Amino acid sequence: MSTKIGLLSDVHATTGPLVEALKLFEAEGVDRVLCTGDIAGYGTELTESVDILVDKGCITILGNHDVWFLNRHAGKMAKRVEAFFQETAATWEATVEGKRIFAVHASPPDSMNRGITLLDQHEKIIFDNKEQWRIELEAYDFDVVVVGHTHQVFAELLGKTLVINPGSTAFNHTCAILTLPEMDVKIFPLSGKEIRKVWHWGMMK
């Protein structure tokens, strides 16, 4: 028996690709959905994005944009959105099909800002970075680490740990499905757009 986990991240208050990803997960028969943060930021559909995640019962963790938004707009946003962020944890972990999974927005143990960057602007692996993170992750007993934050798309085995970033639904146009215990990862394009494995504001020139 296998378990499928739908992975998404960095929604950034944009509902179109979020809804598409959730429909794809439903069609693929996922058992649960995990979102690695940054529901807020950039877009204009924060309340709608939160409502969708709550309605679908998604496991969600906090990102840096979520904390910034909460700090800046406390008492000024919809009460259900404020309560959502206040009640959301910075990390999540579970054992699924005998595999220990850990999720954090940027990097273990609980960083929301120091992201795991493995790709250069040409979408090629940066081997020095890969080796650095392999060494750092030796301190943790995880089979799978799921992150977001960097707007990069990858699934790389670093030592004994499979590190996955499903990319931003809004900017990389991606989501992913992790199948356990096989440790199989499939990346899916969204919005009828080509997958961008690397995206950041500085590239938008």
Image: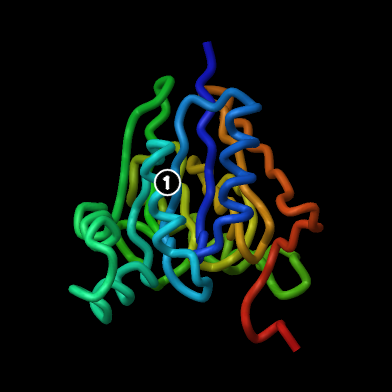
Residue reaching furthest bottom? 205
Q: Position of residue 136 (x, y in %)?
A: 41, 59
The answer to which quarter of the image holds residue 106 is: bottom left
Q: Residue at x 80, y 52 (%)?
A: 192
Could one spot residue 125 in this view of the protein? yes
Q: Position of residue 76 (x, y in %)?
A: 24, 75
Q: Nearer the viewer, residue 81 or 58?
A: 81
Q: Nearer the viewer, residue 16 or 67?
A: 16
Residue 28 relative to residue 84: left or right: right
What kind of residue is marked 1? Leu
Q: Secondary structure at mark 1?
A: helix
Placement of the C terminus among the 4 image quadrants: bottom right
The answer to which quarter of the image holds residue 118 is: bottom right
**Residue designated by label 1:** 53
Q: Position of residue 35 (x, y in %)?
A: 45, 48
Position above or below: 187 against 196? above
Q: Position of residue 130 (x, y in %)?
A: 58, 61
